[in-house]
Image (tube, helix red, strand yellow):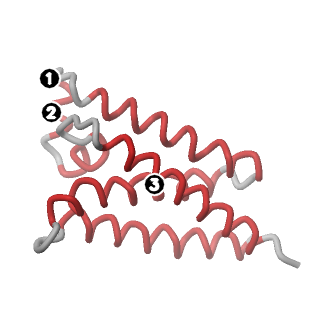
Amino acid sequence: MKNRHLLLFISLVLVTLLGLAFKFYRGFGQEWLNNNGAAIWYEVFWCLFFFWFFPTKKAMILIPIWVFVVTCILEILQLWRSPILQMIRTTLIGRLLLGTTFSWLDFPHYAVGSLIGWLWLHQIYINSYKK
């Protein structure tokens, strides 16, 4: 158990730092890294986060699927400009969680991130239950 928590904690810190680095990177390829690359790490983060609370083999498969579905729904919500959502999007946390601009090109990156998330969870599961 402790091994799993340690692996998850280190992974969450690493993925958070990578995601923020991609989101705020300035330089060559910054547009892709800020938007699409960061979206990949966003998916991985949420997979790791929920695996902390639901560390089962079944959850290891279901979490990346649900993270992908919910993230796609959030992407579609970016088309909706309600006052409450716009107010939330004015904050850094709101922009990071909800996003600001709809793009069909985000969906493949969400799929890649969820796949990487599943692979990451699989490795944590295998390494934390070794005898």
Q: Helix, strand, or loop for circle 1?
A: helix
Quadrant of the rendering where the N terminus is positioned: bottom right
| Rendered position, 29 above or below 112 | below
Q: From mark 2 to mark 3, how far is it between C-alphas?
A: 28 Å
Position of 48 compared to 77: left or right? Answer: right
Determine contact: label 1, label 2, CB under 8 Å. Answer: yes
Number of marks in the image? 3
Q: Position of residue 73 (x, y in %)?
A: 39, 29
Numbered disc in front, either 3 or 1: 3
Answer left or right for 99 relative to 26: right
Q: Amino acid at mark 3?
A: Gly
Cα separation, mark 1 vs mark 2, equals 6 Å
Residue tagged by mark 1?
83
Secondary structure under tag 2 reads helix
Instruction: Pick the residue in front: 116 or 126.
Output: 116
Q: Which residue is mark 3?
A: 113
Residue neighbourhood size for the residue with mark 3, other residues' Cα within 10 Å, grouped as few (<14), some (14–19), many (≥20): many
Residue 131 image offset from top left, x and y in percent: 88, 79
Mark whose residue sits in front, 2 or 3: 3
Tell me the crowding category of disc 2: few under 14, some 14 to 19, or many 20 or more residues within 10 angstroms, Cα based: few
Q: Residue at x 47, y 57 (%)?
A: 44
Identified at 16% across, 23% down, the residue is: 81
| Amino acid type, mark 2 | Met
Is 106 in front, or is 86? 106
Residue found at x 39% / y 60%: 41
Q: Quadrant of residue 84?
A: top left
Picture residue at 42% right of the left edge, 68% below the top: 15
- Give the SS element for disc 3: helix
Residue type (three-letter) at the residue carrying disc 1:
Pro
Q: Which residue, given by chain and number where applicable, does mark 2 sit on?
A: 87
